[in-house]
Amino acid sequence: MVSFLIAYASWSGNTEEVAEIVEETLLSEGMDVTVYRIGIGPMPDPWEFDAIIIGSFTWDKGSTPDEVKDFVADVGYKPENVYVFGTGDTQFGGDDLFCGAAVKLARFYGSTYEPLKIEQSPRGTQEKKVIEWSKGVFQHWRHLHALKY
């Protein structure tokens, strides 16, 4: 069975809500999913997963939060299959800084799948966007690994 780790950091609850929708969507596709709130409890071993999904809010003019940076350092290597989502707020910095943490993380990991950017909460029309992105992540992963599985 294909296993995904969803590791996220959340202060306001928005990123946590996105992580929950991603989890529900991947479970409905038959994936094995482990969810880890960054900084809370022992970190799962990233080597045990086929893919990692990292979720982060954006902080301080487009910055990645320290706890997410610490998680990246604790992983200690750049896994091949990393997908990224983020929450942000365009009223602080406009489109240029919107979800800057997600963009930076996707670039750092060389993710070949576009990061998901959510304005504040994933409620309403944005929930559908999260579900579609999550299904796309699975399809993208499956396409890349078609010869293995």
Image (cartoon, helix red, strand yellow):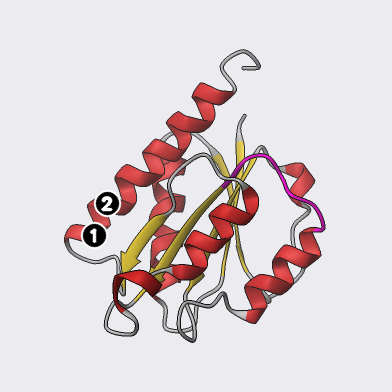
Dominant secondary structure of the magenta stretch? loop
Q: Residue furthest top?
A: 147
Q: Is residue 77 magenta?
A: yes
102 up-or-down from 1: above or below: below
34 up-or-down from 11: above or below: above
Q: Secondary structure at mark 1?
A: helix
* Nearer the observer, 139 or 66: 66
Write the start and end of the magenta stretch as one range.
76-82
Q: Secondary structure at mark 2?
A: helix
Toward which corner of the image does residue 21 lie, by quadrant?
Answer: bottom left
Residue tagged by mark 1? Answer: 126
> Where does residue 125 sit, x and y in percent of width and height?
17, 59
Residue tagged by mark 2? Answer: 129
User: Which residue type carries mark 2?
Assistant: Lys
User: Which residue type carries mark 1?
Assistant: Gln
- Disc 2 to disc 1: CB gap under 8 Å: yes
> Where does residue 11 sit, x and y in percent of width and height?
49, 83
Query: Which residue: 39% across, 62% down?
Result: 18
Q: Residue furthest front?
A: 96
Q: On the rendered structure, is 38 left or right of 90? A: right
Query: Which residue: 40% across, 45% down?
Result: 134
Pick the quarter of the image with the N terminus: top right
Instruction: Report the number of numbered marks.
Output: 2
* Nearer the observer, 45 or 136: 136
> Where does residue 149 sit, x and y in percent of width and height?
62, 17
Q: On the rendered structure, is 44 left or right of 26? A: right
> Where does residue 99 sit, x and y in percent of width and height?
41, 68
Q: Residues within 10 Å of mark 1 (few under 14, many from 20)?
A: some
Q: On the rendered structure, is 100 left or right of 124? A: right
Query: Which residue: 43% across, 30% down?
Result: 139
Toward which corner of the image does residue 67 lie, by quadrant?
Answer: bottom right
